[in-house]
Structures are given as structure tokens and as C-alpha cells.
Image (spheres, rainbow, N blue to C red):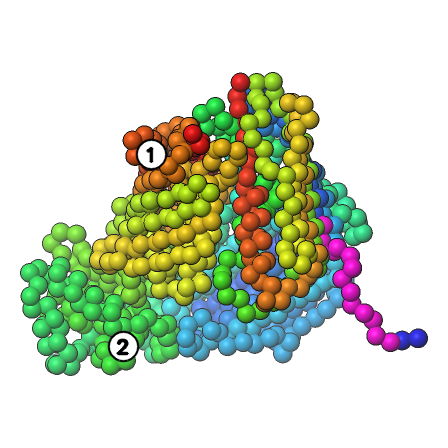
């Protein structure tokens, strides 16, 4: 037989799925549990970080950039099973920030999406993500009776010109006592030419701005 | 009973150092594996000083690497120079059961010229050993020959996350030379014997469990449990010295520099002319220091006598460059030409260093600065920096001991203590906010000390690099347009930063905008965890940050909610904020002041300081809520 093998990028090779279930207490304390599943290259990245420094993985990577967040019962699964996602689960405790009668809940916990990697105006080389990537965040937030929702981040879909990078966010309230949110970032192309840099930079800027938008609650 | 007797007999016959008969990893006691990635099974080091100019250092080490995190122990690395050569290298690798699986000799090592400075004449010898699985054991045997004895090799007993089963270090030295030693971060004494010709010191440790390195501690050579050795008499290249006192060691330094501080007559006249209008010695020193900063460059050149003998002042004067020694000596020569006495001083540099011990004269220095004695408060000068403020050393060399090199020998003196008011960043920002959330910010920065160094990097960077720095170093939001203008540079470096930003609020919802207390981070570094902290924590330097941010609200918006003013304190810092709304001007004014009093935080106080800085970061997540009327 023989012949050339086509190198195609059909499959998403980097997947991070985060599920956060949390409960806001009436005293402003936020308790929750997190399950993070990292597949493909996301698995490689995290397993390697974990293997190189097990004792500081939580402090260095899980709590990266966060303060006053307490992480307990950190557990991993599938460290040795190459074909399965690397599973990281833990419980956390933090407080919500309040100003006056308003309290704020961030949808940007444990994501690593605080900063835009693309800042400079001039770029001379291509942007190579290496593979298609997917980040999916699912939130369930239970609210106590003494808080009500004042404002929610808008449901939105942000796409770049050739629709290869997509950011979607949906936030819904199920009655007044539960919030559900889904945030998804899909990078469906690994290589972006220099000519696409401007739109990519702008996309990431918008996305980081949106990731920093918060749920506003009002104490009643 | 019989068994333990025979074991005792073997130990006794080898002077207490029995090499294990098997390298089977399964025989490691469980207690030693606790918290360890490497177990030092056996170590026998002999440092044999044969004469003032000749010594050998023989190493035999057996290390078992338990897992991937200990793989650093599988990297062999030694450096050589004109004074230090390596020989008789034998490296063997064993699998978990102790079966030999690989072997290397000196010819297998990689070699690389050392590139630390611009020019050096040393060589690295290294080998990265790979093993198929863990645990794996590696055995190193080699010898280093010394032809100079300025520095005796320390006995570094234990690395982080390494347990020690058995280790011994023997130092042999002719009786008339003898040596001095000092234990560091460990309480240990040697056995001492004298055979009529040589003195023999032997330190032995057994069954030491692993400890863990912590982030932000003192520099590693002050950190490891070790024994520091120092010669009384030494030879370095073709010079001989006596280190038994700071005075005699300084005398050696003085002799090395003697006569090198002469400048040609016309250059002396140049300096006399330069300072002719100055009213005091301090002013004269400041003028010459400014001339040095503006006309000379720092270049690290470690040729000649192993990084200790400076180039003559005349040479530096012609070339307009030099290393720390060359520039310090040049500055001293320039001051001499206007009749001002100054002393070059040896020091150990970087913010995370301890002071060298006054009772243990030893060469632990790697830098040179200049001291100009005055009736009150000596003037200290860092001669390698074109940007440092006159008379301020910075935490690079403050808070420790320097050895002044004087005509009467060495004098160990304390450098100034770091002071928060030497490092000030004072910012005033006016934010013009439009109804669509876009806006412009005008920031006036006045910076001193470390912040001045940072701002100097920012103002001299290329445009696109500046943009990165605005976001990553100064913590602003990503601007669409910006301008950075340097205003003045005397004691403070003053800079204007103007930005236009697409979205000023953190977010908007309905008729409200939610603004951050400031448009940049005052502090965002998350300090390492505080639980079980055992070592002191080092910040780069103490500092003060003062900020006033004025939000000019869009015409039809009013402030609805303001963050509460705060006043936080710990033993080492204060953080005060206040917020007000000027209704008639429709302005929100946010004022903040953050001060860190000392850069070294005792381990026992670290948890408080960590909590304090976590709360400083949290404060920044408050929001100013404004609402459309």
C-alpha cells in the first residue's frame, strides 16, 4: 500500500471540562465542589505539572492567582490511565465581595483566563495553538433566601471572522434560588496566520473582559 | 547480638564510614523516604589540603532517586577553571534492585565554556543521566584538584526533599595552616585528630529525614544545612593572603588594588573642574557619581585574577566600561583626585542574602560597592547602575555586612538598613468615563528606588513592549491607544501615562456600571502558602505605594454605592483606603496607601503578612457602583 498520510486536524485534542457546584450561605460564604476533567493535551499538561510537584499542585495551579480561597479534599483519578481524562476534584470555600447592598459572584474561578496572552500590536509570526482546544465551564449556584439576583452577565456568543474561535455564555436562573451558567471556549483551528492576529487579539480582549463580568446579587 | 557486633567492627575499621554493600532501593528505611524524592545513601568526601597552593577534593556519593521529582540528582555538573580541574570520573547507574545498568567516564561528560559574564575562562562538565524507571540509584566518584585555596569547598549536607542515610566529610590540612569552620542551619561538631603533621576534621551525619525548601527564602548558600570551611592562609593565582581575620583578608584585597587608583593629571583636573562649584563633599560626590552613571557602562569581565583584581582606573577611564570592581575603583580614583577619601567594599549581593558572620572571616562575597566615609552617615554607592539614586544602595546590598578595603586592612561594617521611603510609587490618575463605558485615563507617576528602576525600564522600552508592561507590570487594563512621556528625573523619576480604554468598568448591567477601586493593581502578587512556614520570607524591598484615582462620571450618572473605607494593619505593613463622592463635581475619589515596612519577614510572622496581602488583593475586588439617573 504506502503513500502519504494526510495530517488533518479533525479532532479536538485539548479538552478541559470544569463543573462547579456551589452554595452561597446567608452570611456571604461561598462553599462548593469542583470537578475538572482534562483530556488529550490538557491531560498531558496537567499530569506533567502534577507529577513534577505533587505537594504544591493545588497552591501553584488550582489556586493560581486566587486569594482567600480555601481548597480541601483534593483528589485525582486516572493519573496512570493514558486514555482517560485526568480527573481533579476538590471542595472550596471562599467569600463573596460586597459593596453596599450588592454582592458579586465571579464566573472566573479556576479557569486561568484572567489575562489576554495577546497584547502587542505588531506580530511577525503565526499563532500556533498546536491543536484544537475546548474549555467548558458549568456552574450551579444555590442562593439563600436573603439574596436576590440584581443583574446577570448577558447570554452571548462571540465569534471571530472565520468562526473558528467561539466564546459562548449562557446564564439562567431557575426560580430565584438557583443560578446555572455555562461558559464555553472553542478554538477550532490550531494555526492562525499573522494576517489573522488582529482579530484574534481583539477576540481575546473581548473574551477576557467578558470572563471578568460578574453576577450581581442584592441582599434583601 | 552477634550480627550487631560484626557491623560495629566494620564501622570501626572504616572510621565509621561503611559503604553499603547493596544499592537495593528496598533496603531504605521507610522513615527516610517520608517527604523525600532523593535519598543520599552514602557519601564520603575528603578535602585534603596538601599545601597553601594545593588541595584535592575527592567525592564518592551514592544517591537513590525515588521518583521523577528527584531527577535533578541524575544531572551531574561540575565547573572547572584555571584553579580547579576535574579527574577520575566514574559514574555508575543502578536499577531498583541495585543491579548496574549503565556506566560513564570523564570522556562521556559534555563540556561547555562557561558564559556567566561577557568573558570567562571556565568550563562546565555535565551529564544528564536518564533511567528507565524509579527508584534508580546513581553512584558518583570523582576528584577535583585545586591549585588555589581562596575558597574551601563547603560541606553541603542536605538538599531540599532529600534524606541522608550516611554522609561524612573529612578535611585534612597541614598543622601549620589549619582551617576554620562554621556550621550553618545545623548543630554539628567534627571529630579532630592530629597526626603530628596534619590536622584531620571529620563530620558525620546519619539518618537525617527530608525537609522541604520554601518559596521566598534566603539565598541557597545561606539556606542549606552545611559546614562552611575557610582557610587561614591561602594562595590565589600568584598572590598569598591571610584570612584569619577580616583585617588581614582586607589587607590582601588592598594589596591587589594598590596603585591602580591613579588617573592621569588632565583627568584629575577634569574632576577638580567638575566639582568646583560644589559647596560640600556630599555635593562633589553626587556630581562625580552622576558623571559616572552617564558616561560609563557595566560589563562583567572575569578575566585576570579570578574576578578579584580590578582593572586600573586609567584603563576604565579610557574604555568607559568596567565590572563592579573596575567601576568602584574608578569612582574611588575620581574622588581621590578631588581630595575625597573612599573605600571599595566587598559584599554579597541580591535582596535575599544574610549578612556574613562577623566572627567568621571567609570569602562569601561576589560584588563590590563603594563607601565614602562622612562625619555623619557614610555615603554608599552602587557604581554599576546608570539609574540608581545617589546614595541609595537598595535591597541589592542593604541590611548586611560589607568589608571595607582600607590601607590598614579590612574593616567589616554594616550597610544601611532598607527603608520603605526609599522605594515609593506615587500615582494620581484622572479617569474620564463616557456613557458607553469607554474612557481615557491620565496617570502621573512619581517613582523612587525599585519603582524608579521599573519605570526606567518602561520609559526606555519599545512601543509594543511598553504596551505589554502597562498591562503586565503596572496592572492596567489593555489599552487601545497610549502615550508614555518621561517628565523629570532627579530624586524621583516622573512619568505621564495616558491611555484610552474601550471598557473602563469591570462590567455593566442594565443602567449600572461597576467600577474597580482603581484602574490598575496596587498589589497582585499572591504570596506562597503560610502553613508550617519555617524560614523567613524575603520581599524584594520594603516600599510605599500611594494612589489617588479620580473618576469623572458621565453627566447623567451618579454614584450609588461606594466600597467601605478600610484600614488594615499587620506588624510589617499598613493599607488604608478611602472613597468619597463629590456630588457637585460628579466625581468619585478613591485614595489608597500601601506600605511594607521591612523586606525580611520572620517565619513566625509570615502567616499574618500573607493574610494581610491576601486582604489587600481582596479589597481590590470591591466595586464602585454608578447608576444612570
Along the line of sight, which residue is nearer the eye, B348 or A137?
A137
Marks 2, 1: nearer the viewer: 1
Residue range corresponding to the magenta coloring: A3-15
From what the image shows, is residue B617 above or below residue B387?
Answer: above
How crowded is the residue under tag 2: few (<14 C-alpha within 10 Å), some, or many (20+)?
Answer: some
Q: Which residue is drawn at 54% across and 69% down?
A: A124
Give how far across and how far down residue B483 sits, in percent: 36, 58
Magenta stretch: residue A10 in it? yes
Left or right: B523, with A128 as reference point:
left
* In front of the other: B596 or B155: B596
Chain bearing mark 1: B
Rounded to the nearest angstrom, the CA distance separating label 2 from label 1 is 56 Å
Q: Residue at x 18, y 55 (%)?
A: B378
Q: Is residue B47 above or below residue B553?
A: below
Residue at the image point whose x is 67% and y is 23% from the top: A175
Q: Residue at x 54, y 42 (%)?
A: A212
When the figure is inspected, residue B113 is found, relative to residue B578, above or below; the finding is below
Q: How crowded is mark 1: few (under 14 residues within 10 Å), some or many (20 or more)?
A: some
**Residue holding disc 1:** B586
Q: In which quarter of the image is the C terminus of chain B?
A: top left
Earlier along the polypeptide chain: callout 2 or callout 1? Answer: 2
* Secondary structure mostly taken by the magenta-highlighted segment of the chain: loop
Q: In which quarter of the image is residue A179?
A: top right
Above/below status of B605 relative to B319 = above
Q: Is mark 1 on a helix, strand or loop?
A: loop
| Quarter occupied by residue A177 | top right
Residue B577 appearing in the image: yes
Q: How many labels does the image show?
A: 2
**Pick the front one: A168 or A112:** A168
Helix, strand or loop at disc 2?
Answer: loop
Q: Dot 2 corresponds to which residue? A: B320
Magenta residue check for B318: no
Amino acid at each position: 500500500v504506502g503513500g502519504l498520510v494526510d495530517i488533518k486536524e479533525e479532532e479536538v485534542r485539548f479538552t478541559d471540562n470544569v463543573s462547579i457546584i456551589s452554595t452561597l450561605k446567608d452570611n456571604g460564604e461561598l462553599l462548593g465542589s469542583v470537578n475538572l476533567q482534562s483530556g488529550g493535551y490538557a491531560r498531558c499538561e496537567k499530569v506533567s505539572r502534577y507529577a513534577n510537584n505533587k505537594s504544591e499542585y493545588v497552591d501553584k495551579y488550582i489556586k493560581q492567582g486566587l486569594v482567600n480561597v480555601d481548597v480541601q479534599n483534593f483528589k485525582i483519578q486516572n493519573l496512570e490511565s493514558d486514555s482517560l481524562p485526568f480527573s481533579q476534584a476538590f471542595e472550596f470555600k471562599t467569600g463573596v465581595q460586597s459593596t453596599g447592598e450588592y454582592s458579586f459572584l465571579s464566573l472566573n474561578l479556576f479557569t486561568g483566563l484572567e489575562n489576554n496572552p495577546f497584547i502587542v500590536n505588531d506580530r511577525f509570526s503565526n499563532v500556533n495553538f498546536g491543536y484544537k482546544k475546548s474549555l467548558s465551564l458549568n456552574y450551579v449556584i444555590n442562593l439563600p433566601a436573603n439574596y436576590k439576583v440584581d443583574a446577570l452577565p448577558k447570554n452571548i456568543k462571540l465569534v471571530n471572522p472565520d468562526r473558528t474561535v467561539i466564546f459562548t455564555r449562557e446564564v439562567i436562573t431557575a426560580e430565584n434560588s438557583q443560578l446555572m451558567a455555562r461558559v464555553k471556549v472553542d478554538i477550532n483551528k490550531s494555526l492562525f496566520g499573522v494576517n489573522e492576529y488582529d482579530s484574534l487579539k481583539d477576540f481575546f480582549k473581548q473574551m477576557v473582559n467578558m470572563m471578568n463580568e460578574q453576577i450581581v446579587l442584592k441582599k434583601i | 547480638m552477634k550480627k550487631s557486633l560484626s557491623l560495629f567492627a566494620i564501622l570501626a575499621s572504616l572510621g565509621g564510614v561503611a559503604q553499603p554493600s547493596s544499592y537495593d532501593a528496598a533496603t531504605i528505611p521507610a522513615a527516610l523516604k517520608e517527604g523525600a524524592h532523593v535519598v543520599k545513601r552514602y557519601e564520603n568526601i575528603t578535602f585534603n589540603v596538601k599545601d597553601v597552593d594545593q588541595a584535592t577534593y575527592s567525592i564518592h556519593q551514592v544517591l537513590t532517586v525515588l521518583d521523577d521529582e528527584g531527577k535533578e540528582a541524575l544531572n551531574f555538573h561540575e565547573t572547572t577553571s584555571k584553579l580547579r580541574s576535574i579527574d577520575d570520573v566514574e559514574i555508575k547507574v543502578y536499577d531498583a534492585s541495585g543491579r548496574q545498568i549503565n556506566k560513564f567516564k570523564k570522556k562521556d561528560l559534555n563540556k561547555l565554556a562557561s558564559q556567566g559574564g561577557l568573558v570567562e575562562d571556565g568550563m562546565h562538565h555535565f551529564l544528564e543521566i536518564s533511567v528507565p524507571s524509579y527508584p534508580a540509584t546513581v553512584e558518583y566518584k570523582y576528584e577535583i584538584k585545586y591549585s588555589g585555596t581562596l575558597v574551601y569547598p563547603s560541606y553541603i549536607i542536605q538538599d531540599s526533599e532529600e534524606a541522608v542515610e550516611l554522609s561524612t566529610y573529612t578535611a585534612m590540612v597541614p598543622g601549620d595552616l589549619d582551617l576554620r569552620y562554621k556550621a550553618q542551619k545545623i548543630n554539628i561538631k567534627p571529630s579532630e585528630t592530629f597526626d603530628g603533621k596534619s590536622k584531620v576534621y571529620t563530620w558525620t551525619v546519619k539518618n537525617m529525614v527530608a525537609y522541604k525548601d520554601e518559596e521566598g527564602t534566603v539565598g541557597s548558600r545561606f539556606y542549606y544545612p552545611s559546614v562552611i570551611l575557610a582557610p587561614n592562609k591561602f594562595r590565589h593565582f600568584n598572590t598569598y593572603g591571610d584570612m584569619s581575620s577580616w583585617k588581614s583578608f582586607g589587607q590582601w584585597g588592598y594589596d591587589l588594588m594598590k596603585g591602580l587608583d591613579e588617573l592621569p593629571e588632565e583627568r584629575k583636573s577634569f574632576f577638580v573642574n567638575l566639582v568646583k562649584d560644589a559647596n560640600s563633599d556630599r555635593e562633589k560626590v553626587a556630581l562625580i557619581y552622576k558623571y559616572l552613571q552617564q558616561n560609563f557602562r557595566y560589563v562583567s569581565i572575569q578575566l585576570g585574577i579570578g574576578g578579584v583584581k580590578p582593572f586600573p582606573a586609567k584603563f576604565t577611564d579610557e574604555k568607559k566600561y568596567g565590572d563592579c570592581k573596575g567601576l568602584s575603583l574608578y569612582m574611588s580614583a575620581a574622588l581621590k583626585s578631588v581630595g575625597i577619601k573612599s573605600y571599595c567594599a566587598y559584599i554579597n549581593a541580591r535582596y535575599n542574602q544574610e549578612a556574613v558572620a562577623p566572627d567568621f572571616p571567609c570569602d562569601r562575597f561576589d560584588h563590590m560597592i563603594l563607601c565614602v566615609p562622612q562625619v555623619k552617615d557614610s555615603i554608599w554607592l552602587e557604581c554599576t547602575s546608570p539609574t540608581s539614586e545617589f546614595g541609595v544602595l537598595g535591597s541589592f546590598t542593604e541590611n548586611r555586612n560589607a568589608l571595607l578595603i582600607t590601607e590598614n586592612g579590612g574593616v567589616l561594617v554594616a550597610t544601611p538598613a532598607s527603608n520603605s521611603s526609599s522605594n515609593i510609587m506615587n500615582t494620581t490618575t484622572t479617569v474620564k468615563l463616557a456613557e458607553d463605558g469607554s474612557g481615557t485615563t491620565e496617570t502621573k507617576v512619581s517613582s523612587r528606588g525599585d519603582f524608579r528602576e521599573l519605570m526606567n525600564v518602561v520609559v526606555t522600552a519599545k512601543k509594543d513592549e511598553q504596551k505589554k508592561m502597562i498591562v503586565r507590570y503596572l496592572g492596567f487594563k489593555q489599552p487601545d491607544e497610549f502615550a508614555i512621556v518621561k517628565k523629570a528625573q532627579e530624586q524621583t523619576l516622573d512619568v505621564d501615562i495616558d491611555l484610552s480604554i474601550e471598557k473602563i468598568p469591570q462590567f455593566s448591567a442594565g443602567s449600572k456600571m461597576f467600577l474597580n477601586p482603581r484602574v490598575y493593581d496596587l498589589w497582585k502578587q499572591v504570596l506562597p502558602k503560610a502553613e508550617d512556614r519555617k524560614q523567613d520570607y524575603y520581599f524584594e524591598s520594603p516600599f510605599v505605594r500611594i494612589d489617588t484615582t479620580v473618576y469623572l462620571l458621565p453627566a447623567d450618572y451618579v454614584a450609588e454605592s461606594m466600597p467601605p473605607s478600610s484600614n488594615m494593619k499587620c506588624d510589617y505593613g499598613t493599607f488604608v483606603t478611602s472613597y468619597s463622592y463629590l456630588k457637585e463635581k460628579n466625581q468619585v475619589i478613591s485614595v489608597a496607601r500601601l506600605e511594607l515596612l521591612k523586606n525580611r519577614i520572620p517565619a513566625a510572622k509570615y502567616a499574618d503578612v500573607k493574610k494581610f496581602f491576601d486582604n489587600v488583593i481582596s479589597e481590590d475586588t470591591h466595586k464602585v457602583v454608578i447608576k444612570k439617573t
